[in-house]
Image (cartoon, helix red, strand yellow):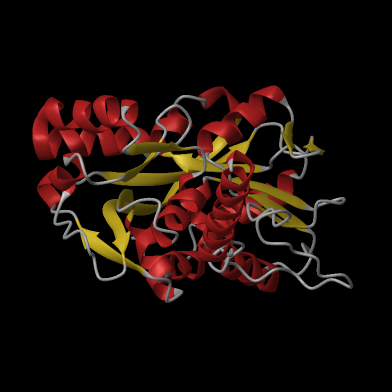
């Protein structure tokens, strides 16, 4: 009898696992950009997709480290830059969190899975605060785009989220960027204080982290949309452009705007590295980032420019 019970339990567990796998069959997994053409196209969702590494890693003529939430702009940016500067065709870009990229710069390498990358960037872009913390690394800096916060929710907003205060509710599952390495983390905490004083910030960042109703991401520009779309989170504070982009893709998400009095504006700054391996290419790309062409691309994806 006990043996039959064990068999029944095992079968039930298998069925449950199968249904979970079917419910999350990677249909919304990145990369969301268009991959470059190659003789062998081998992307396996959930296993080998490497969405935050772009372009030519072999003998690049330009290497750019972008704060990750700009990933949606990369295809258009690189195509336009190559058109204006046809001498640069082998370009490599990373779109990881700015704190991780900063550690890669200071440490000289990064390992992702079994791959170790030792390429040095020619240009690094991040929020103004992060750039200001590293002045010794740059020969030139330029602001080029701006952003504000929004809340990403599931399609139709089934939980009825209206603002940041709702994220403090016990039943609301929040996807939150980890302030330790995510540039957006601190501005979101500031917005919590504006919306509900220190009490709201503590509720979301301390109490709800402890009871697991707030999940701290490592790569919020990837994890957060996926957690929303796979019903692992109900709401997530993000940069406006990220919520805007998911709607551009017709993914099952919606965008809740945050009023100006509770919002934070971010300034994106590019830094030309003093030790840029490709100094002329770095200068040309810096000039391109502040050009009308590049600014139009950023506006296309929900950023603001001046």
Residue 282 falls left or right of residue 59: left
The relative height of residue 199 versus residue 245 in the rendered view (above or below) is above
Residue 303 visible here: no
Number of numbered discs overlaid on the protein picture: 0
The relative height of residue 70 versus residue 202 in the rendered view (above or below) is below
Residue 100 pos. (x, y %): 57, 33
Is 304 in front, or is 178? 178
Which quadrant: the C terminus?
bottom left
Residue 114 falls left or right of residue 39: left
Residue 253 pos. (x, y %): 35, 66
Residue 291 pos. (x, y %): 49, 63
- Which residue is situated farthest in the front direction here? 1
Is 244 in front, or is 130? 244
Residue 301 visible here: yes
The relative height of residue 209 versus residue 95 in the rendered view (above or below) is above
Residue 81 pos. (x, y %): 64, 66
Residue 21 falls left or right of residue 118: left
The relative height of residue 189 versus residue 257 in the rendered view (above or below) is above
- Residue at figure coordinates x 12%, y 27% from the top left: 199
Is 175 in front, or is 103? 175
Which quadrant: the N terminus?
top right
- Residue at figure coordinates x 73%, y 27% from the top left: 108
């Amino acid at each position: 009898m006990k043996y039959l019970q064990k068999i029944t339990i095992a079968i039930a567990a298998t069925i449950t696992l199968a249904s979970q796998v079917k419910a999350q069959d990677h249909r919304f997994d990145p990369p969301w950009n268009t991959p470059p053409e190659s003789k062998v196209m081998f992307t396996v969702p959930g296993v080998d997709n490497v969405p935050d590494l772009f372009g030519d890693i072999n003998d690049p003529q330009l290497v750019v480290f972008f704060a990750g939430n700009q990933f949606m702009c990369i295809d258009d940016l690189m195509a336009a830059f190559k058109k204006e500067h046809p001498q640069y065709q082998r370009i490599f870009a990373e779109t990881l969190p700015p704190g991780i990229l900063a550690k890669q710069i200071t440490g000289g390498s990064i390992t992702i899975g079994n791959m170790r990358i030792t390429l040095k960037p020619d240009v690094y872009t991040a929020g103004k605060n992060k750039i200001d913390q590293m002045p010794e690394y740059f020969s030139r800096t330029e602001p080029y785009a701006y952003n504000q916060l929004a809340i990403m929710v599931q399609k139709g907003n089934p939980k009825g989220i209206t603002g940041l205060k709702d994220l403090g509710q016990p039943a609301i599952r929040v996807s939150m960027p980890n302030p330790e390495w995510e540039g957006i983390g601190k501005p979101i905490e500031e917005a919590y204080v504006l919306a509900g004083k220190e009490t709201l910030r503590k509720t979301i960042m301390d109490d709800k982290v402890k009871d697991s109703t707030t999940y701290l991401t490592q790569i919020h520009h990837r994890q957060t949309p996926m957690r929303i779309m796979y019903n692992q989170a109900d709401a997530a504070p993000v940069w406006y452009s990220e919520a805007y982009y998911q709607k551009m893709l017709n993914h099952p998400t919606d965008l809740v705007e945050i009023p100006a009095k509770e919002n934070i504006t971010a300034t994106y700054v590019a830094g030309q590295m003093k030790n840029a391996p490709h100094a002329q290419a770095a200068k040309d790309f810096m000039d391109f980032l502040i050009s009308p062409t590049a600014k139009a691309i950023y506006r296309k994806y929900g950023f603001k420019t001046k």
